[in-house]
Image (cartoon, rainbow, N blue to C red):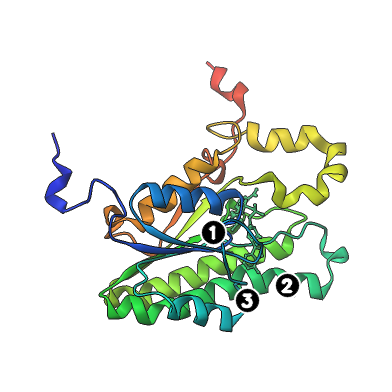
């Protein structure tokens, strides 16, 4: 039997580490912040929205990043989780809406990385975990701004991983197929007219159904912890196999 303690892994997987989590007032970010605390980390939970114990940080604001990071003794982990969604076909997507999505979902993580690289380097390394999406691995109609932002995050992640690896800083993406439904609540009414199609979206996976937020947070925890010390530049899908392809159940019954 393997004795993983030879690797020096702590029983509390983030003991002694300090982490920044963006977009932590609700949804996935809130669960990540809680799980990280439960695993021994000191967590600076940030958001543009107000909330108990939440530090104000608009990820698009360079001054906010400077303020948050300069107030910390050490930064071992950054989780770039904050994002916004825009739904609608290209012809009905304004340039302003498109730019706003790129600003939050792609410029935000870049500013976060840039802010933490100095302190991480000074302390010998760290882990940057971006919460991307299945929409950063495969395309989908009606979400061009969001999809472009998440594919961009894949490029940023790869370049940063190669650039920072020799400083002991790892950079990886978690790619969930699902999250907090509140993110797309403004389109609920319109989506009611094609519920069968959206149900098929999560039913036609290797593992059908919604992905629990805890499973997304657990992937972020793994990438934040020293257990993943030789993993960098990677996409980790948490999608029940959705990015692997679709299931046609009848094909399993062929003789
Ligand atoms: N909801 C989904 O179906 C889904 C699917 C795949 C991936 N994701 C990804 O998961 C991550 C978390 O999303 P979620 O599902 O928890 O949705 P959510 O809307 O509940 O959480 C997003 C959080 O980001 C915050 N935020 C928005 N703009 C911000 C800004 N400028 N600065 C700081 N914070 C800001 C919001 O206030 C909110 O608390 C995102 O990166 C999202 O793209 C979500």
Give the image location of residue 241, x and y in percent. 52, 40
Q: For the residues carrying marks 3 and 2, which lies nearer the camera in this image?
A: 3
Q: Looking at mark 3, is its residue's CB closer than 8 Å to ligand 1?
A: yes
Residue 60, label in figure? 3
Image quarter for ligand 1 equals bottom right
Give the image location of residue 116, x and y in percent. 42, 76
**SS type, badge 3:** loop
Residue pictured at 28% horizontal, 48% vertical: 12
According to the image, label 2 marks what residue?
100
Q: Report how far apart the C-alphas of labels 3 and 2 lie in the structure.
A: 10 Å
Q: For the residues carrying marks 1 and 2, which lies nearer the camera in this image?
A: 1
Give the position of the N terminus as an image quadrant: top left
Relative depth, front residue between 91 and 24: 24
Instruction: Judge the density around disc 3: few (<14), some (14-19), many (≥20) Cα neighbours within 10 Å.
Output: many
Give the image location of residue 206, x and y in percent. 53, 33
Residue pictured at 36% horizontal, 56% vertical: 41
Task: Classify residue 123 as left or right of residue 78.
Answer: left
Instruction: Judge the density around disc 2: few (<14), some (14-19), many (≥20) Cα neighbours within 10 Å.
Output: some
Whether label 3 touches label 2, CB < 8 Å:
no
Q: Report how far apart the C-alphas of labels 1 and 3 lie in the structure.
A: 21 Å
């Amino acid at each position: 039997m393997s004795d993983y303690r030879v690797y020096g892994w702590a029983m509390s997987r983030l003991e002694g580490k300090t982490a920044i989590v963006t977009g932590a007032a609700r949804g996935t970010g809130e669960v990540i912040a809680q799980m990280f605390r439960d695993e021994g980390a000191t967590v600076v939970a940030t958001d543009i929205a107000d909330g108990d114990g939440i530090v104000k940080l608009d990820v698009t604001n360079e001054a906010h990043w400077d303020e948050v990071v300069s107030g910390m003794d050490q930064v071992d982990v950054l989780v770039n989780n904050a994002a916004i969604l825009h739904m609608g076909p290209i012809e009905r997507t304004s340039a302003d809406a498109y730019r706003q999505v790129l600003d939050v979902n792609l410029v935000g993580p870049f500013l976060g990385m840039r802010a933490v690289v100095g302190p991480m380097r000074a302390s010998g390394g760290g882990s940057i975990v971006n919460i991307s999406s299945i929409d950063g691995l495969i395309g989908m109609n009606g979400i061009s701004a969001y999809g472009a932002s998440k594919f961009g995050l894949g490029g940023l992640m790869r370049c940063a991983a190669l650039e920072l690896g020799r400083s002991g800083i790892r950079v990886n993406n978690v790619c969930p197929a699902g999250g907090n439904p509140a993110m797309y609540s403004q389109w609920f009414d319109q989506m009611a007219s094609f519920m069968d199609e959206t149900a098929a979206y999560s039913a036609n996976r290797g593992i059908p159904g919604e992905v629990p937020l805890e499973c997304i947070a657990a992937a972020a925890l793994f990438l934040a912890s020293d257990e993943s010390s030789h993993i960098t530049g990677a996409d980790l899908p948490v999608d029940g196999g959705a990015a692997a392809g679709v299931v046609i159940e009848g094909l399993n019954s062929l003789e």
